Amino acid sequence: MTLALLKDVTQPLIVAISIMCAALLVRLNRGMPTLDWQSLEPAERKVLTYRVLELSREYMSVLALQFLTLFVLLALSLIKEKTFTGWANGPTVVLAFVGSLLGLCLSRMGYIVWRDTDIVRLQKKLIDESADRQAIDKASKEALETVNTIRSSALKETSKPEVVSWPDTGGKGTTGS
């Protein structure tokens, strides 16, 4: 990689980083997930809200990193290549710095995608557990109502018929042959 080549790819890199910034801003705008909070246990709610808040903080740090990268790329697009010729390792240092920033931006975006899916898995778990609790509560309530209905019907015990034993045929069967 040379500074001349970096200058050629600066514009597409700026577009790509800008799109990542826009995606983060859209994600930050969503805020907390919409759930029926009353159906979740308080401890589960606290875990979910803490993790969403933690994720939002990470969005902000990655957004700051992307803004820094955009600033560096814009500055490089304005600086002449001859500026670094007086430095012994000037172009190498600049290229390494820009490459590090770009790599960090991409890796942090991958991490954010992973964290988003982690939050979705947590939401799924909490929603499924809440639905299971509601189904169990509903089934228990219906069973209790059925038992109470049976008890309140005032059924009377009837006399039991006498138990009669089957005759022993001596192993010959019932045909009498």
Image: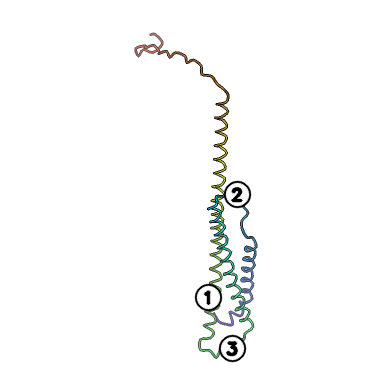
**Amino acid beneath label 3:** Thr
**Amino acid beneath label 2:** Gln
Q: Nearer the viewer, residue 28 or 21?
A: 28
Disc 3 crowd, CA 10 A, few/some/many (<14, 14-19, 20+) = few
Q: How far across and how far down the image is residue 44, in percent?
A: 53, 53
Could you say whether the residue bearing mark 1 is in a helix, strand or loop?
Answer: helix
Residue that carries the numbered disc 2 in the rendered image? 38
Q: Nearer the viewer, residue 177 or 107?
A: 107
Residue that carries the numbered disc 1 in the rendered image? 100
Q: Residue furthest bottom?
A: 86
Could you say whether the residue bearing mark 2 is in a helix, strand or loop?
Answer: helix
Left or right of 172: which side holds 139? right
Q: CA distance from mark 3 to mark 2?
A: 62 Å
**Amino acid beneath label 1:** Ser
The residue located at (57%, 43%) in the rendering is 134
Q: How far across and how far down the image is residue 107, in percent?
A: 53, 68
Q: CA distance from mark 1 to mark 2?
A: 46 Å
Residue that carries the numbered disc 3 in the rendered image? 83
Left or right of 49: which side holds 166? left
The residue located at (44%, 13%) in the rendering is 162
Q: How far across and how far down the image is residue 152, in percent?
A: 57, 26
Q: CA distance from mark 3 to mark 1?
A: 21 Å
Disc 1 crowd, CA 10 A, few/some/many (<14, 14-19, 20+) = few
The image quadrant where one finds the C terminus is top left
Here the colouring is rainbow
Q: Nearer the viewer, residue 12 or 74?
A: 74
